[in-house]
Image (cartoon, rainbow, N blue to C red):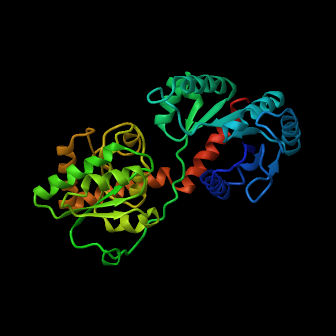
Amino acid sequence: MRVLILGDRFAESARRTALTQLLAQLDSARIQAVVTALRAEQDDLVDQALRARRPIALRAAWRLLKLLKRLNIELIHVVELEAALTGILAARHADLPLSITCERVPLAQGKPRRRYLWHKVQWQFLGRMAQRILVPSELVRRDLHLLAKVPLARISVVYPAYPFQAAIGVNREALGLAEGKYIALILPRDYDAGYLQAIDVLERLRKRGLDAHLMVIGDGATFQALRKATEHLALPIRWFPNRAELPELLAACDVVLDCTEREDLPDGVIAAMLAGKPIVAPRQSGITEVLEPNVSALLVMPADLSDMALQVSRVLQYDSLAERLGRSANKRAIERFTPQAHARAMTEFFETAIYSLR
């Protein structure tokens, strides 16, 4: 089956990397993919260039139609919304199924109303035009359904591949870590005040007599807020702003604590799962989608700092519990977030989308 993957400029390095990785893992006996750009030139990723000057260009749509016929394409899959209208025109004229990637859904909270309404109308239109919409999580699937009333049956979840290679045989002394129990706090790139709760959790653990230390990993606004909040506190906290050290730091820690206030699946949780580390996190959408309470993680009610500290202390004191949680989390991560798992899921998605018009 031949799939045309349509984008605009393919300017984002993360998207290029993810797409390159997917193409390398796809089973060519089942899916042959052709990457086509609306306004970018051919390169090591882009196979075909439509040479458009604007996102909406009739000449580019005409070139795309000829390309579809010449290559015997059976599905158009749009990965950048700037190319969606061109993809829609070509798919309808050629009587081909169309699928579109939706990476995130803007919600009404905290958004200018005009922008929110624009996104709502946009996805209502795209939802009617596409046979399938691809989303990265059940949370986005739910939000898209609520925003644009796209039927859930036409929204497919495929978890993205997470670029993480676990480190083995890490020496704590080489990282400058003293003896004790280490709690890793992996910060998001955007500000999230929930991670400030880790200070309270660390204080509670120290009062219980545990030799607990906090490893803060990441940079950005949350990192700076944590440093400011703790500058007058005599707490054992190590700061690691370089995210490139994440595999070694995870290998050296005893437990990963997540304190997000958002309904989301933090990258830090995925990294901890792939590293096979026990996790303590809030019980909320996004996290509960991939972690099973008391099986692959210990989950607490959001902002329940007393229970959060209690669950962290359980992991630090009982090695068998920590090993069981880490093993289960790692198994679930391998089933969802590796490049191989992502390629298998994308192959099934493409085949389902192709058969939707047959």
* Residue nearest the observer in this picture, 149 or 109: 109
* For residue 106, side relative to residue 255 (left or right): right
Quadrant holding the C terminus: top right
Quadrant holding the N terminus: top right
Q: Is residue 166 visible?
A: yes
> Residue 204: x, y in percent?
15, 52
Q: At x 56% / y 40%, what residue is drawn?
A: 103
Q: In the rendered view, would you say 308 is above or below 326?
A: above
* Residue nearest the observer in this picture, 245 or 229: 229
Q: In the rendered view, would you say 291 is above or below 92?
A: below
> Residue 133: x, y in percent?
61, 33
Q: In the rendered view, would you say 152 is above or below 48?
A: above
> Residue 260: x, y in percent?
35, 44
* For residue 208, side relative to residue 194 (left or right): left
* For residue 94, side relative to residue 161 (left or right): right
Name the image quarter holding residue 249.
bottom left
Q: At x 29% / y 57%, what residue is drawn?
A: 324
Q: In the rendered view, would you say 182 is above or below 289?
A: below
